[in-house]
Image: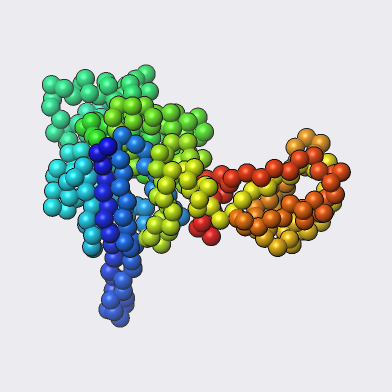
């Protein structure tokens, strides 16, 4: 399978000067190496300030690396910049980027013009992308009347105008209502079916788990875990999860459980007339007998062990 992206030992340093004119450097990326297969959804995850946006800016030719090399479909992002730009679409989203009084179709006509699309093909292409994102009925409606979810879909349509092979989607569902977010998540597999490759950044772990074929998790500019969502949950998560359902629990139950050696965290919730406890345990530590001793066997309805969710694994890796 062809590689859509190759990052080889990417380093990026930002330099600034203090009031005393002393040089100050901040390393945003250090020795970043990964590949993205064509026709897949690749998740680039990490906390704020981890280096995700810097990586996207380098791969989309908006920023040059301090060291290392990045390629998009075998074209170097620095020396072959124009070839890279022919093959990519950047979807940043948000409320800005469109002319509110104009309708959706006229906005797309404007962006088609500045992208130098063939005039004879513009109407057909706009009809295609606006149908793909589900905005055909709203095409004649002024954009300032669009909901945030509709604007986000219009951003996707704009990114698809030039029919790029690779789409960068930077937190596409942030700030959108659940219905709008679902519509965007449903759209991503359809784009992949059409041969697109997608690099997705998101803070929503369930979204990454659902959509991504491969994930790279970065923190402070370095890779800390990579693999499929299942591999990260099983291999990189530093915790295991025990779920306990009990008939009743004393007020001090959570404190007693939290005091067991190897227990990281305890969450308590009600499930009808019973109580459910989700207990995070350091991977490899056996605590079931101690948990049973806290409640008593007659009080325990069930006790099961499971792998962490992607969110639980992510938090255990980052913290």
Give me the residue at 33% from left, 68% from top.
Answer: 26
Give me the residue at 68% from left, 58% from top.
Answer: 263
Is 279 left or right of 64, judged from the image as shown?
Answer: right
Q: From the viewer's side, name the closer residue of 264 and 93.
A: 264
Is 175 left or right of 83, judged from the image as shown?
Answer: right
Q: Quadrant of residue 218?
A: bottom left
> Can residue 46 be seen at all in this image of the molecule?
yes
Quadrant that contains the N terminus: top left
Q: From the viewer's side, name the closer residue of 265 and 19.
A: 265
Q: Quadrant of residue 137?
A: top left
Tally of numbered discs: 0
Q: From the viewer's side, name the closer residue of 186 and 306.
A: 306
Give me the residue at 37% from left, 57% from top.
Answer: 51
- Residue 168: % across, % down: 31, 42
In the picture as drawn, the residue positioned furthest to the bottom comes out as: 20
**Relative to 259, is 113 above or below?**
above
- Residue 174: % across, % down: 45, 42
- Residue 28: % across, % down: 34, 62
């Amino acid at each position: 399978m062809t590689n859509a992206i190759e990052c080889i030992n990417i380093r990026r340093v930002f330099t600034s000067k203090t009031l005393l004119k002393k040089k100050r450097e901040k390393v945003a990326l250090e020795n970043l190496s990964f590949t993205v297969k064509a026709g897949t959804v690749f998740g680039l995850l990490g906390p704020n300030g981890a280096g995700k946006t810097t990586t996207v800016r380098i791969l989309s030719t908006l920023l040059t690396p301090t060291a290392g090399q990045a390629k998009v479909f075998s074209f170097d992002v620095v020396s072959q910049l124009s070839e890279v730009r022919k093959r990519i679409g950047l979807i940043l989203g948000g409320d800005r980027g469109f002319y509110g009084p104009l309708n959706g179709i006229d906005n797309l006509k404007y962006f088609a013009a500045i992208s130098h699309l063939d005039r004879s093909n513009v109407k057909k292409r706009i009809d295609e992308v606006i149908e793909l994102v589900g905005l055909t009925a709203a095409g004649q409606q002024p954009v300032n009347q669009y909901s945030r979810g509709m604007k986000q879909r219009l951003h996707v349509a704009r990114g698809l105008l030039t029919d790029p092979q690779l789409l960068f989607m930077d937190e596409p569902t942030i700030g959108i209502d659940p219905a709008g977010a679902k519509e965007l998540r449903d759209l991503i597999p359809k784009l992949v079916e059409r041969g697109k490759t997608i690099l997705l950044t998101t803070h929503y772990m369930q979204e990454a788990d659902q959509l991504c074929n491969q994930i790279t998790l970065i923190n402070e500019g370095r890779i800390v875990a990579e693999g499929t969502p299942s591999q990260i949950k099983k291999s990189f998560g530093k915790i295991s999860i025990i779920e306990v359902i009990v008939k009743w629990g004393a007020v001090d139950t959570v404190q007693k459980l939290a005091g067991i050696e190897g227990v990281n965290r305890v969450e308590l919730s009600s499930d009808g007339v019973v109580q459910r406890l989700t207990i995070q345990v350091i991977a490899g530590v056996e605590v079931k007998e101690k948990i049973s001793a806290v409640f008593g066997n007659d009080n325990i309805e069930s006790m099961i062990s499971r792998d962490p969710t992607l969110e639980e694994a992510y938090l255990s890796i980052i913290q």
